[in-house]
Image (tube, grey):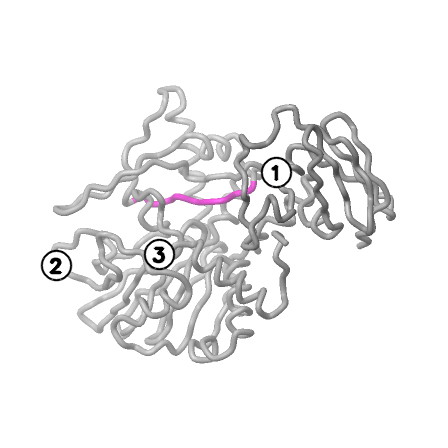
Amino acid sequence: MSIELLSASIVGDVVQIAWQDGRTMVFPAIWLRDNCRCPACRHANGQRLFEITDLPRDLAVKQAAIQDGHLQLVWAPDDHISAFTASWLVAHELGSDSRATRREQPVFWDRSLIDRLPVADWSALRADTAVEVGWLDQYAAYGFGLLRNVPTEPGMVEVVGNHLGFVRVTNYGSLFDVISVPKPNNLAFTAVGLGVHSDNPYREPTPGVQLLHCLESDAPGGDTLLVDGFHAAEILRREDPAGFKLLTQLPLNFRFRDAKADLQAEAPLIKLDFDGAVKEIHFNNRSADTLNAPVDLVAPWYAAYRKFADILKRPEMELIFKLGAGDLVVMMNERALHGRTAFDPSLGRRHLQGCYIDKDGIESRHRVLRRQLGLSKDLAA
């Protein structure tokens, strides 16, 4: 794609740019001034050196021209000069298609993914940045990834968590044991089957990423269930647009209580970004509290809730596999909904350890490693 600038013109409070391949782009003047890259406006570390209130209230573009392949602007009333490279303008174009390309593009999946799971060996991932980036690419696309041959030592889930990001401490501690115990404060610590869900929707913010490491897997049953919540939401949008809209608008209360904690938060089951793309799923039947909604919306909301739950339970949506000792699954908590089949603790041990990390940590590591390998450019440059 050509990125050679042809001309620039001032049209009211926007700057219109023409490219040699016939394209045009429009940038608001205030947006361009706020993003000035000059040393007076930006520290060497990239951070702004001014407040928005420091800009003139009567700000306007005085001159717009193409010089040495750059867009150069002279501002009124202070004659400040800004220059933007062609590549920077292309990378930050504000049209809907361009903005969509800058959003992480999820790859929807269903049970057919079983033959091509996103897997890496833990030792190989630690030893080779290219292996880790390849695995993180798949994790970003699918919303989860598997690591094999993680040593079956207690606490290793925390080691992996701190390698990929930063472990988040909760009322369960920095890590927690997923085993069947007497008098559990959470059904996860029993042998019963669990429907797919996102963890801890009663927190604000909800944990972004969950890790589960299998230490022992001798008990019959206890298979892992995964469902692509984003895929299910898009199916609901297609099959029941009104129900989909309602689940994005009305928040549900979630709550967890025991002797030492009383956690509450509310969120819609499906959260969208500004452009309408699915951004988060909050689905947990065990932790759902009351719906605080107008009377006339309660029945339609429950109909949509049931429809969404039915989609999540469709056999073709369920990815089912058994974690063996040394396997560790990393899941985007607000996308890759997880559950398990029931197991019999009287016939063998099933012991998993889990922890949470925040999503920004693993996403930051992914971007930094890709940059180190020359696979992406810094859009702030």
Q: Tell me: residue 216, above or below residue 110.
A: below
Residue 182 x/y as whole percent: 12, 59
Q: CA distance from mark 2 to mark 3?
A: 20 Å
Looking at the image, is mark 2 or mark 3 earlier in the sequence?
A: 2
Q: In which quadrant will I find the C terminus?
A: bottom right
SS of the residue at dot 3?
Answer: strand
Residue named by callout 1:
34
Task: Mark 1: give few (<14), some (14-19) or many (20+) Cα within 10 Å.
Answer: some
Residue 219 falls in which quadrant of the image?
A: bottom left
Number of the front mark, 2 or 1: 1
Q: Nearer the viewer, mark 3 or mark 1?
A: 1
Indicate the position of residue 346 as horizontal and vertical percent values: 17, 69
| Neighbour tally class for label 2: few under 14, some 14-19, many 20 plus, Cα within 10 Å | few
Q: Residue at x 79, y 31 (%)?
A: 10
Instruction: Give the quarter of the figure containing the N terminus.
Output: bottom right
Closer to the camera in the image, 91 or 33: 33
Q: Amino acid at mark 1?
A: Asp
Q: Are marks 2 and 3 in contact (CB under 8 Å)?
A: no
From the viewer's perspective, is 355 left or right of 12? left
Residue 103, position as x, y percentages in the image: 59, 48
Of mark 2 and mark 1, the one earlier in the sequence is 1
Q: Is residue 172 magenta?
A: no
215 left or right of 334?
A: left
Indicate whether residue 278 is drawn in magenta.
yes
Give the labeled residue for mark 3: 339
On screen, residue 142 above or below 133: above
Magenta residues span: 277-285
Query: Which residue is drawn at the image coordinates 28% and 70% (left, top)?
Result: 220
Query: Which residue is pictured at 26% across the width and 60% down the height?
Result: 174
Q: Amino acid at mark 2?
A: Pro
Amino acid beneath label 3 = Gly
Is disc 1 placed on a helix, strand or loop? helix
